[in-house]
Amino acid sequence: MPTDNDNHVDRRTVLKYAGTAGAVGLAGCAGGGDGGDGGDGGDGSDGGDGMDGGDGSDGSDGSDGGDDTFELGVTMGQMDSGLDPQDHAETNTEIIVGQLYEGLLDRDKQGGIIAGLADEWERTEDGDVRFMLRDGLTFHNGDEVTPQDVRYSIRRIVFEDVGIASPQSNDLGPVTEVATGDGQVTVSFDGYNPIAFQLFATNGPVVQQSWIEENGSDYINRNANGTGPFRLANYESGNQVVYEPNEEYWDGAPEVDELTMTASSESSTRVNQLLAEETDIVTNVPPNEVSRVNGSDVATINSVPSARIIFLQMRYDVEPFSSQQFRQAMNYAVDVESIIENVLNGFGNITGQPTLEGHVGYNPDIDPYPYDPDEAERLVEESGHAGVEITLQTPIGRYLRDVEIAQAAANQIDSLSNVSCELQQREFSSLVQDITTGNIEDKPHFNLLGWGNGEFDGSQTMTPLMASNGALTILKNDDLDALLNEAETTQDSEERVEILQQANQLAHDLAPWVFMHQQFSVYGVSNEISWEPRADEFIDPDTATRQ
C-alpha cells in the first residue's frame, strides 16, 4: 500500500518499464478516477451518445508503412462529457482529459505513488501536507505553472463559490485552506487526513487560473490548456479527440506522434476495428471475443483485475428499496457466481462489500450473499412489498457486458414469485446525468453502476456513494456516517483499517447495493505496439512504444 513515505520516483521511468499489475490489491488508496470512478469512479454527464466515433476508419493503427509517423488509436465504449478536467466524475472523461492535464502526484501501473507536477512532498508537524513544484513547469500555452495556479485548482474543486460545483468535491478530502509559498503549496484539512497523498496521487488536476477565469464553460469544455504529455490538436464532441505530443513536457515528449481517441458502445465494433488494424487499443473486450482476438495475427488480449466494482444500487428513500429486508432479498435473488461464469466467462470476482480485496479496509470475514431465491421470497414477504413491480436501469456499453449482466440479474429477480422486474436500457450519457445530480430525489430508484477506486482505499468508495453527504450517495445511515467520519480523521493506521472493516460489515448488512463483482479490464492490443495496462483503468498512451 502506498504510504506518505513512498520514495519519490519520476513518472515516465516507472510507467514505461513497469509490467502488468498482477493483482489490483497491491496498492493502497480512483483513477485517473473512476473514478475513480471513482469514481466511477462512478461515473458528471458523459456527453457520449453511444456513437461509434465515425466510421472507425481513423487509420490510427500505428503501422503506416509509408513514413515513420507513430500514430496510435484508442477506442473505448463511451466518449467524454467535456474537457473541463474538474467538472466530471466518470472514467472515460478522465482518460481523455488525463492526456492533457495532470495533478501534483501520480501513480505507477501497480498503483504506487510517484512524482507528478510536484517532485517532493511531505507532511508537516501540524498535519498539513506540503508539495514542492518541480522547476520549469509550463502550461501548453507556454505560461509558467505557479503555486497560485495550484491553489486555485484545488479550491475550484473543493469550494463551490470559486466557480463550479465540482462532482470531484469529495476527492481531495476535507480541505479547509490552501496556502502558497516559494515554489510550494500547503494544504490544510478539517482534522487529520490520513490518506492525503493517496488522494492527491489520483485526483486534483491542475489548471491555469487566468485561462479558466478568462473563458466560459463551453470554451473550457472544447479546448484545453494543461501540462500533460499531449496537447489538444482537434476536438469533435461525441466523436473523437486528436492529440499531438507536448514537446515541452517536463518528463520528455512521448514517442507517439499522433493520438486519436474514439468510442463505440458496441463491443463487437471495437473488436472488429482492432482486427481490421483501424485502432490499436480497445477496451472491454467481451469474453466471447477473447479467443478471436488471441487467434488473430494482429492483436492479443491483455487483461488485469481492475479497481472497479460493479453493483446494482437501490435508493434508500423510495419504496420498496426503503426496506432493508427488501434490499437484502434482492441480494439473495441474484446468482452472481452464475453471471460471472456464464456471462463473463470467469472475468470477474464476486463481492459482498463495497471494498475490494487488497484495498485498505477490506473485511475478510464478510462472505458474499449466497444465491437463495427461497430466502429472497421470504424477505420480500416480511418487507410488506410482495407483488411489487420494479425496473432496473442499465447503461449500454459502458462496462464489460453491462446489458447482459443487468438482463441476467433482472430475469433472476423477475423469477421470484412475489416480485416483477423489468429492464430499461439507457445511454450512459443520459443515465449518468441522473446519477450525478446533486438531489437524491432525481436519481434512479434501481440501476447498475460501476465505481473505480483509484485510491485503493475503502473510504473512497463508501464516502462518495454511501455517506449522507456523499456526492453520489443513495443512502443515509447515521452509524455508517459516524464510522466513515472516524476513518477520515484517525492517525492510527491499524485502527483505521478496523474502522473501515466495521463500515464494510455495516454496508453489507444495510445492503444499499446488490453486490455484484470486481470487473476485469480486458484490453485488445495491437501487436504493432508494446503497452501494459494499469490497475486503476487509466489509459496512458504516452508509455506506449512501437514493437
Image (tube, grey):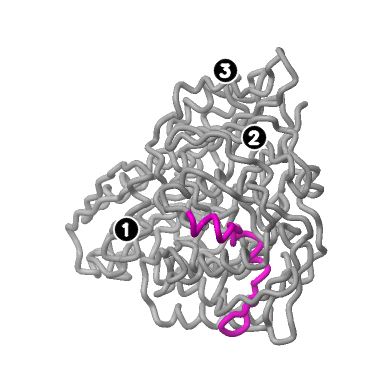
- Mark 3, residue position: 276
Residue 267 in sight from this viewpoint: yes
Asked whether 262 falls inside the magenta stretch, the response is no
* Residue for point 75% across, 59% down: 115
Nearer the N terminus, badge 3 or badge 2? 2
The residue range painted magenta reads 187-214
Nearer the N terminus, badge 2 or badge 1? 2
Element on which disc 1 rests = helix
User: Residue 36: x and y, percent?
Assistant: 54, 56
Indicate which label's residue lies in the foreground, 2 or 1: 2
Residue 66, image quadrant: top right
Q: Which numbered dot is residue 228?
A: none
Which amino acid lies under the numbered mark 2 shown in the image of this protein?
Glu
User: Residue 192: x and y, percent?
Assistant: 62, 82
Work out how far the residue at label 3 is from the one at label 2, CA to CA, in angstroms. Answer: 24 Å
Work out how far the residue at label 3 is from the one at label 1, CA to CA, in angstroms. Answer: 49 Å
Indicate which label's residue lies in the foreground, 3 or 2: 2
Residue 516 drawn above or below residue 438:
above
Indicate which label's residue lies in the foreground, 3 or 1: 3
Element on which disc 3 rests = loop
- Mark 2, residue position: 244
Q: Which numbered dot is residue 374?
A: 1
Q: Is mark 2 in CB contact (under 8 Å) with mark 1?
A: no
